[in-house]
Amino acid sequence: MKNLLIIGVTITMFFFKSSSNANYEKIFYDFKINSISGDIIDLNDYRGKPVLVVNTASYCGFTKQYADMQKLWEKYKNKGLIVLGVPSNSFNQEKKNNDEVKEFCEVNFNINFPITEITDVKGDNAHEIYKWAKENHGKSAVPKWNFYKLLINKEGRIVDTYASLTNPTSKKIINKIESLLN
């Protein structure tokens, strides 16, 4: 009976193991993504800086988090933090085109941190950054909803993920960012 229990626990651990200690073939800084204005954002330009990546949407109940993302950006950008907004219609709550999203962000939230074009963040059509995140950090890196957050360390690896309910200026996120900046 004891052997069956050990086998059962071992099998269970195998199925629920986390891949957060993955042996990354690529790091976050190896990717590029189009900006909301159509320019290329070369993530290598952010090398050595922590990055908070947030998939966003204009028609979501969490959209007010844009204001807190901007506050975070203003407070920590000179210390090296990058806040990267990734508008997505993966949950059917985004505007029709990039120009509308850009205007919405600027008019309603005075956003000046980097924002990408409208991008898929889950499924077969997900941007390669999100496929990479899933491959290297597991299912916890796949956005469950809008305003899901990935925190990338200075080495270009995911250190944590945060649910939509977790505000960008929460103590939990701030403490982690400050530890990465030191």
Image: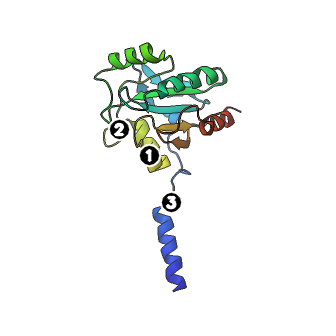
User: Closer to the N terminus: mark 2 or mark 3?
Assistant: 3
User: Closer to the N terminus: mark 1 or mark 3?
Assistant: 3
Q: Quadrant of residue 120?
A: top left
Q: Is residue 15 above or below residue 5?
A: above
- According to the picture, the residue beneath numbered tag 1 turns out to be 134
Q: Residue at x 45, y 34 (%)?
A: 147
Tell me, yes or no, whether the two marked residues, 2 and 1, touch with CB atoms within 8 Å.
yes
- According to the picture, the residue beneath numbered tag 2 turns out to be 126
Tell me, yes or no, whether the two marked residues, 1 and 3, touch with CB atoms within 8 Å.
no
State the separation of the CA atoms marked 2 and 1: 10 Å
- According to the picture, the residue beneath numbered tag 3 turns out to be 17
The local secondary structure at tag 3 comes to loop
**Residue 37, visible in the rendered structure:** no
User: Whole-percent x and y of residue 151?
Assistant: 55, 37
Amino acid type, residue under disc 3 in the picture? Lys
**Residue 119, visible in the rendered structure:** yes
Q: In which quarter of the image is the C terminus?
A: top right
Residue found at the very far right of the displayed protein: 182
Amino acid type, residue under disc 2 in the picture? Ala
Q: In which quarter of the image is residue 125?
A: top left
